[in-house]
Amino acid sequence: MKAIIIGMGRSGKCAMYALKDLGYELAVQDSKDADKAEPEVREFCREHGIKEYYGDMPDDFSSYDMMVLSPGVDPESTFVIKAMEQGCEIVGELELAYRLAKGIFVGITGTNGKTTTTTLVGEIFRASGRTTNVVGNIGLPVISVATNSKPEDWMITEVSSFQLQTVSQFRPRVSAILNLTPDHLNRHHTMELYGAAKAAIWENQKAGDYLVMNIDDPVLMKLCLYDVDKEFKGTLVGFSRKTEPEVGAFLKDDRLVIKDEEGRIFDLIHRDELRIPGDHNVENALAAAAICFFAGIDTETIINTLKAFGGVEHRLEFVKDLSCVSYYNDSKGTNTDATLIAIRALKENIILIAGGDAKSQDFTEMAKELHGPVKHVLLFGRDRGMIKEALDKAGYTSYSEHSDLGECVKRAHEMAVAGDKVLLSPACASWDMYPNFEVRGKHFKDLVNEL
């Protein structure tokens, strides 16, 4: 078999190692120039006779059986279409990993809350004693553990819409769609296409499988579950803060409970026992509890882990108190809905730091909600002008523009008074100034800790 791997980031490198071990004849391609490629990749290619393309593409793909796309590569790119026309199968890293893995998959997607929910599910699975790999969009490529997995291993997988664009056989035992709000429209173009990408997570599921869905989200229900009644062969499991699903997890008198397929109700914990703040984290906890319960984990393990879970880095992460001012790192808030979720959780006296790569978003609705809870907005990054324009239209005047994150933190420190909350929740991707949201969040924490 002969394959070409497009994109030599983390997932591309892991795909290269895995396929080489399986005896594939390989070529690799990356948009970087050769002098900027990772030395580790270049050395491996030289040692194993792997053809390299940097900054350009092969003229002909007809000799390749497979093209492996990293998630950041748009499958609608001209060269991908050309490869398909020449008979090359197009697969993503997730699809490839699924085909090579022997373990059991849990797939978790949605616009917001994926990382928190995936991390929490992983903690519950580990506490139950199951062999657990927490992988996917959360940071560890699925392919890196797929080839060594055993049939009893569980692959708790955070799945992005980019990864779902290139699946064909991927079938999780339990899938979950947490919510659907505008994001990545520069790639998906419309909400309908974005929803269709997310819906791919359940399309191969069969009898005995479970689909966990947020029944409070009308956009999700319309765009991700359009044919679910007709085509889905598994069991639908709802989760809700507002109503009681036929089967699933919900709030009853402010307690998290689960109803099984026979209608029996299992009490878990009071919402105030969660250590992670906000209504959105109640939803994440309900989703995680439902995923784990219908994967066969006992309620005692679920209860104990829900009580102990303290959240994840870069997601409404408390950094420190300084002179009675609280600092929060929500660098993973890369879209407007995520930022509004963080604002609603902190409620009032917020100094917001926002800006970056806007990803073709509309900031109008976000700007309208800042009146009241947000005292001042500190704007930075390439597309801060787009947010500024939305603020002006909404009549929100308490904002200022700054050259970088360091200047924003310095200004926030100068203007904050006791009781204020300084929140980095950019509503934008980091790619204009940082390689990823983790680096941005770490920089923010370093800046705060230097105050």
Image: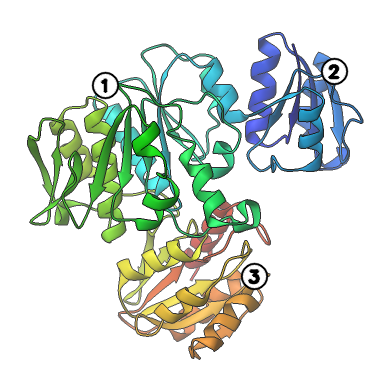
The correct choice, above or below, for 420 with respect to 47 in the image is below
Q: Left or right: 49 with respect to 437?
A: right
Find residue 63 and name its label.
Answer: 2
User: From this viewpoint, is residue 340 visible?
Assistant: yes
Identify the secondary structure beneath mark 3: loop
Q: Left or right: 247 with respect to 103?
A: left
Q: Which residue is mark 3?
A: 381
Q: Quadrant of residue 171?
A: top left
Q: Residue 337: x and y, percent? A: 44, 64
Out of 231 and 369, give the one closest to the viewer.
231
| Point 49% across, 49% down: residue | 195
Instruction: Give amino acid for label 3.
Output: Gly
Neighbourhood count class around disc 3 (C-alpha, 10 Å): few under 14, some 14–19, many 20 upward: many
| Point 31% across, 66% down: residue | 345
Find residue 129 and name its label.
Answer: 1
User: From this viewpoint, is residue 309 visible?
Assistant: no
First-in-chain label (1 vs 3): 1
The correct choice, above or below, for 250 with respect to 445 in the image is above
Q: Residue 431: x and y, percent? A: 66, 57
Tell me how far mark 1 sits from mark 2, CA to CA.
46 Å
Instruction: Give amino acid for label 1.
Output: Gly
Tell me the quarter of the image containing the N terminus: top right
Tell me how far mark 1 sits from mark 3, CA to CA.
45 Å
Count of residue discs: 3
Neighbourhood count class around disc 1 (C-alpha, 10 Å): few under 14, some 14–19, many 20 upward: few
Neighbourhood count class around disc 2 (C-alpha, 10 Å): few under 14, some 14–19, many 20 upward: some
Q: Left or right: 413 with respect to 305?
A: right
> Going by the picture, which residue comes out furthest to the right?
59
